[in-house]
């Protein structure tokens, strides 16, 4: 059955081009278009699409407000289009907070110059989020305030509401963890003086990372590195947002940064992040031969080489298998690897690759991971 798509954009040119690109895929059907947020809500209610592509800046009602309303009235996976600027990053992160599943850069020149590449990327995104397990997610405003570093109560971590499109299933926090390998019995995590916590993620990651990191206390005893598949223009804005919401400190990593407890360093988009045995971060140019920049496998691999069995790695929601080979190296060096469970993933790709390769020491639901990290690091 073809994926039904609603295309929302105030630009007639962009609506036509997106519709043409999607309609060329025999497994995608464009069932309608809308020129503003209000029309988008009406069309979503009437047409019940499987996926909505959404612009942000529109008359009558902007895309973020429309997403928020759609999630309340007819939950549907939304793919946002955004500009590759700092402001575009802020808007995109707001849209993900409101419930959008994923995003793509809105670049008219790319559509004209690289139509085949744009078509493949857009159609792949639409098919992926149409198949997504966790269709959308929204944050409550219960996160610590921007000035709350070190002052928020660790007994009341920020929580976020989850919902499932076209389903009455309970939220992930109410579900048991997905079945896992025998080692992942769901018991207490192995306590150890870890020298590093490394977390890798992709689609659904901005939401997942916020959910995990806002649960950590300001005195979290281990350094953290974060690898999120994200454009170069987005990572600084994302790090700033996390820093305002979390008790720990979060910043975009720079070459020469030193790992320290209670500090999370986010790999910059378009580059690769490695760590050395002295606890220094190295930021390297993105290799064009690699699909991901940053790449989870590269950071995990350097952590395995530098810290042997003193690493706790976590693979969260994401498409593909980035992180599996890095997890293999970590396991070979004696480190611990956790994976997010299927029930709470937006896309059960990266964690599934780790679990299927028998590399996961534990499999936890998203809302369990922050608490278990705090329990495991001594």
Image (spheres, rainbow, N blue to C red):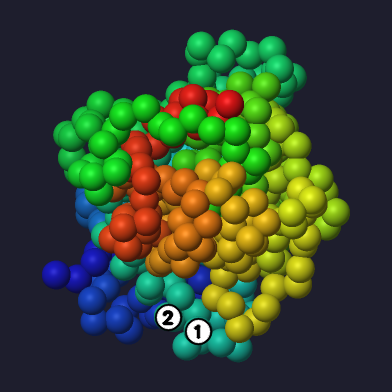
Q: Give the percent coordinates (x, y) of residue 361.
A: 37, 46
Residue at the spot 76% in from the left edge and 48% down from the top edge: 279
Disc 1 residue crowd, few under 14, some 14–19, many 20+, Cα 10 Å: few
Relative horizontal placement of residue 314, taking residue 131 as reference (left or right):
right
Picture disc at residue 120:
2
Residue position for label 1: 117
Residue at the spot 74% in from the left edge and 54% down from the top edge: 277
Picture disc at residue 263:
none
**Is residue 308 something one can see in this rendering?**
yes
Relative horizontal placement of residue 311, taking residue 30 as reference (left or right):
right
Q: Is mark 1 on a helix, strand or loop?
A: helix
| Residues at discs 1 and 2 in contact (Cβ within 8 Å) | yes
Q: What element carries label 2?
A: helix
> Looking at the image, which is closer to me, 175 or 164?
175
Q: How many labels does the image show?
A: 2
Q: Give the percent coordinates (x, y) of residue 257.
A: 82, 49
Q: Give the percent coordinates (x, y) of residue 135.
A: 32, 47
Screen quadrant of the C terminus = top right
**Is residue 95 something one can see in this rendering?**
no
> Looking at the image, which is closer to me, 114 or 73?
114
The quarter holding residue 123 reads bottom left
Residue at the spot 40% in from the left edge and 67% down from the top edge: 320
The quarter holding residue 265 reads top right
Screen quadrant of the N terminus = bottom left
Q: Can you say whether 286 is above or below 229 in the image?
A: below
Relative horizontal placement of residue 312, taking residue 53 as reference (left or right):
right
Q: Give the percent coordinates (x, y) of residue 56.
A: 55, 52
Inter-mark Cα distance, 1 to 2: 5 Å
Residue at the spot 44% in from the left edge and 33% down from the top edge: 190
Disc 2 residue crowd, few under 14, some 14–19, many 20+, Cα 10 Å: few
């Amino acid at each position: 059955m073809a994926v039904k798509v609603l295309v929302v954009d105030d630009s007639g040119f962009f609506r036509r081009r997106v519709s043409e690109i999607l309609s060329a895929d025999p497994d995608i059907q464009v069932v309608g278009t809308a020129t503003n947020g209000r029309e988008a809500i009406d069309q979503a209610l009437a047409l019940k699409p499987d996926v909505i592509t959404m612009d942000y800046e529109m008359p009558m009602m902007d895309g973020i407000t429309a997403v928020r309303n759609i999630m309340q009235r007819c939950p549907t996976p939304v793919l946002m289009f955004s500009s590759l600027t700092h402001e575009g990053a802020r808007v995109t992160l707001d849209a993900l907070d409101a419930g959008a599943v994923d995003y793509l850069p809105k670049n008219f020149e790319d559509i004209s110059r690289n139509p085949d590449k744009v078509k493949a990327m857009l159609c792949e995104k639409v098919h992926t989020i149409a198949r997504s397990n966790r269709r959308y997610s929204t944050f409550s405003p219960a996160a610590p305030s921007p000035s709350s570093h070190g002052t928020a109560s660790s007994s009341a971590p920020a929580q976020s509401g989850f919902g499932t499109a076209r389903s009455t299933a309970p939220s992930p926090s109410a579900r048991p963890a997905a079945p896992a390998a025998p080692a992942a019995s769901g018991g207490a995590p192995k306590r150890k003086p870890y020298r590093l916590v490394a977390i890798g993620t992709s689609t659904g990651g901005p939401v997942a990372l916020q959910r995990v990191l806002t649960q950590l206390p300001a005195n979290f005893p281990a350094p953290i590195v974060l690898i999120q598949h994200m454009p170069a223009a987005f990572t600084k804005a994302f790090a700033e947002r996390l820093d305002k919401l979390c008790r720990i400190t979060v910043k975009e990593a720079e070459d020469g940064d030193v790992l320290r407890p209670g500090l999370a360093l986010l790999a910059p988009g378009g580059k690769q992040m490695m760590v050395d045995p002295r606890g220094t971060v190295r930021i390297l140019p993105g290799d064009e031969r690699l699909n991901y920049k940053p790449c989870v496998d590269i950071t995990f691999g350097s952590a395995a080489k530098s810290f042997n069995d003193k690493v706790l790695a976590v693979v969260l929601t994401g498409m593909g298998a980035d992180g599996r080979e890095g997890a293999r190296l970590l396991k070979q060096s004696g480190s611990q690897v956790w994976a997010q469970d299927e029930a709470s993933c937006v896309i059960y790709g990266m964690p599934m690759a780790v679990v299927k390769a028998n590399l996961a020491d534990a499999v936890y639901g998203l809302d369990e991971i922050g608490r278990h990290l705090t329990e495991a690091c001594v």
